[in-house]
Image (tube, rainbow, N blue to C red):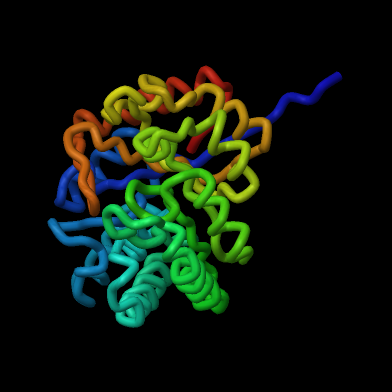
């Protein structure tokens, strides 16, 4: 007899897509039964812009209300690869400190913007050197770095994501798999990207998109092959975070917005897919 595959994931999300105000963010997550958030923005500021008082105020409120932080949704690596990367390393170290303060096991980052019209290959050595430095700096912490595939950075395609992960080859650097972002880069997320990156995936961003125009839609309503992806995650016994990043009202380089109603629409779509896949969530 074949044993039933048991799989349970933990739902989280970019709560700044709900509203700038932390109370509204947490109220909406609570209504959806979601007890974690991916911390990117509060009170109209990116997490990296919060001062010490604001960071402590946010941390205390999360503790008071019983919320955990799944990851710091940092903008690390979302700078031009030709810029002052030594200064950016100092920003990265601060992001690590913020992750430790909030007890976040993950820190989301990127692999640097490539100048328009330039061949990414000419910046490969620089990118790999910096990503290796990031991974080594995280060694003394309990934090794992997760690289998100994103348009216009070095690691926007499946092949270059794989290049980063296999070349750096460090247990502190893993993948945050984002199907919609792959679609917007002309990559089929399940048939092309997943077979190459599955072994490196330790975090999943939940959004979908159409190949025809790149428009972002709730999971399962685009070309992200979400049922197949969830089936593969279940077969692997994935028990990590699934982070809602709906982008249903607006999306930009450093943030997105959905509002409470559309965030709930995105959460409902994901929960329906999980039920169909017989994947439990908490």
- Check the image and report above or below for 106 versus 35: below
Q: Is residue 127 left or right of residue 267?
A: right
Seen from the viewer's position, the closer of residues 40 and 184 is 184
Q: Position of residue 249 (x, y in %)?
A: 17, 33
Q: Give the residue drawn at x 43%, y 71%.
A: 100
Q: Locate the N terminus by quadrant.
A: top right
Q: Give the residue drawn at x 53%, y 47%.
A: 159
Q: Is residue 253 left or right of residue 236?
A: left
Image quarter of residue 179: top left
Q: Position of residue 32 (x, y in %)?
A: 33, 33
Seen from the viewer's position, the closer of residues 186 and 172 is 186
Instruction: Kindly tell me whether residue 171 is visible in this rendering.
Output: no
- Check the image and report above or below for 72 versus 245: below
Q: Position of residue 83 (x, y in %)?
A: 28, 73
How many numbered marks appear?
A: 0
Instruction: Kindly tell me whether residue 78 is visible in this rendering.
Output: yes
Q: Is residue 37 left or right of residue 273?
A: left
């Amino acid at each position: 007899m074949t044993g039933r595959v048991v799989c349970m994931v933990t739902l989280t999300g970019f709560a700044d897509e709900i509203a700038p105000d932390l109370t509204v963010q947490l109220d909406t997550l609570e209504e959806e039964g979601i007890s974690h958030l991916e911390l990117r923005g509060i009170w109209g500021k990116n997490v990296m812009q919060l001062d010490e008082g604001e960071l402590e105020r946010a941390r205390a409120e999360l503790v008071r209300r019983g919320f955990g932080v799944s990851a710091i949704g940092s903008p690390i690596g979302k700078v031009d690869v030709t810029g002052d990367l030594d200064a950016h390393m100092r920003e990265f170290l601060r992001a690590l400190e913020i992750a430790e303060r909030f007890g976040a096991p993950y820190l989301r980052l990127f692999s640097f913007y490539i100048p328009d019209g330039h061949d990414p290959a000419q910046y490969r050595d620089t990118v790999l050197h910096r990503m290796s430095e990031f991974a080594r700096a995280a060694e003394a912490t309990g934090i794992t770095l997760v690289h998100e595939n994103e348009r216009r950075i070095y690691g926007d395609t499946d092949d270059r994501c794989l290049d980063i992960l296999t070349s750096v080859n460090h247990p502190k650097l893993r993948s945050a798999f984002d199907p919609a972002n792959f679609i917007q880069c002309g990559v089929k997320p399940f048939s092309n990207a997943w077979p190459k990156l599955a072994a490196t995936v330790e975090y999943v961003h939940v959004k979908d998109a159409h190949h025809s125009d790149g428009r972002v839609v709730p999971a399962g309503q685009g070309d992200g092959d979400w049922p197949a992806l969830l089936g593969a995650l279940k077969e692997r016994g994935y028990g990590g975070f699934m982070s809602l990043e709906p982008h249903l009202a607006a999306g930009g380089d450093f943030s997105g917005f959905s509002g409470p109603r559309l965030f709930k629409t995105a959460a409902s779509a994901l929960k329906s897919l999980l039920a169909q896949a017989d994947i439990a969530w908490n």
